[in-house]
Amino acid sequence: MQPTKQRQHTPIAALVAMALGWALMGSSAAQAQTTTPGTAPLTLQALFEQAWQRQPEAQSATLRREAAQATRSAAAAWTAEPMALELSTKTDRPGSNQGSREAEVGLALPLWLPGERVRKAALADAETQALDSRQRAAQLQLAATVREAWWAAQRAQADGALAQDRLLNAQRLAADVARRVRAGDLSRADQAQADGAVAQAEAAMAEAQGARDSAQAALAAWGVQAAPTLALAEGAEPEPPVPDATAAAAQHPAATGWQDQAEVARRAADLAAVQTRANPELTVAATRGREQAGDRYQQTFTVGLRVPLGGGDRAQAKQAIARADAVAAEARAAVERDRLAADIAAAMARVKATQAQRDALARHAALAQGTRGFIDKAFRLGEADGPTRLRVELEAAQAERQLARARIDAAAAISHLRQALGLLPQ
């Protein structure tokens, strides 16, 4: 009776082994199907550039640079403020051509205070540099969000491909089992097992589809059109050279941004130190007038200088506020450098850990495939039973899934390291 029992269960075990073998090869085929012919796959760099063009900082960058350039040009002008034209007339008999008359035309030229022009130009240059730093910081902040959405989509795409292959293979197996049950080769218990495998695959497919829809919804915020299958290119970024964490943190745009803000505040304090009073004005005027009707008009010229008195406490308050802003920005830059150094060190450790895990799982997957081959040969020779064959197939499939996830995690860790170093997607 024992040989008869083995012959009854051999077909179902062989079918399960064949289905799981298809599942191991199906992920690469499903990945190949994700790219529609004639449609270029979406890359991380293209996604970031597309997202950046939609940001307010990108759309206003040109106008802000024009404003900074205009401020720098104003610092190079001959006068501290635009010149003013003065027109006046005077008579002792309004509405009549009798009596005295006088008309005056003059120009008021605001003059630079000593050292003000140079310091205002330095402030304009510092503000231009700070503008570039703020834009780079905004790009990095966006890059962090885009990278997170990108790797979520990569994981969802891979899980969806595996779930789809699993469902197709389970349905194919269930159909074959149903045909053999009708022919009397298999029992209804085998049919129940096959149908249960289909139900499990459908549940996994529903979960994977929900994760993929969520990932596509996140990408849609950056202008990516939703599609049943999103064509994602290889997401791995080049691994950057491993620098000293402290030195790298000092060059990070988040730290240099605060340093630039501190420089702006210092330049503003230097400017406030010389702006202790309002700008003096040089007045040049020409006057034409007569004493009474019938007299000849006389021409006179006037040159005057208007010097305001000191600003007192107001000037000191302005200077103190600027220096306080400089101290606060420098302190924030120091704190930011320490935080960034810790983030870079943690990211470097994460890269090493995920790469070691990927390599270990690659060896495990290779060993699982080798074991699968040995057990398959033994099963065909009758030296291994069906449960052992099924267990080995499940272990091989699980090893492949773990390896696929480990590869994505290793690539995502490199992307996180680039983010910590202040590098944009590439």
Image (spheres, grey):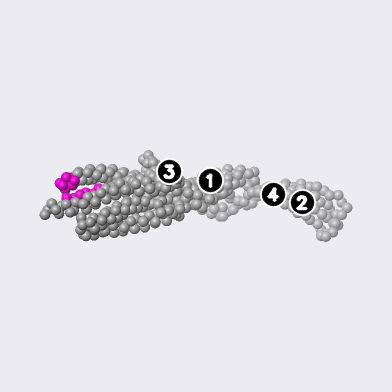
Can you identify the residue that label 1 sits on?
A: 128
Mark 4 near mark 2, Cβ–Cβ under 8 Å?
no
Spatial CA distance of label 1 from label 3 is 26 Å
Secondary-structure class at tag 4:
strand
For the N terminus, give its image quadrant: bottom left
Q: Nearer the viewer, residue 73 or 204?
A: 204
Res 426 label: 3
In the rendering, at what x and y percent does residue 72 appear?
Answer: 58, 45
In the rendered structure, the answer to whether residue 45 lies left or right of residue 99 reads left
Spatial CA distance of label 1 from label 4 is 31 Å
Res 354 label: none
Marks 3 and 2: which is nearer the front?
Answer: 3
Q: Amino acid at mark 2?
A: Glu
Spatial CA distance of label 3 from label 4 is 56 Å
Res 108 label: 4
In the rendering, at what x and y percent does residue 259 appear?
Answer: 46, 46
Secondary-structure class at tag 1:
helix
Q: Amino acid at mark 1?
A: Thr
- Type of secondary structure dominating the magenta stretch: helix
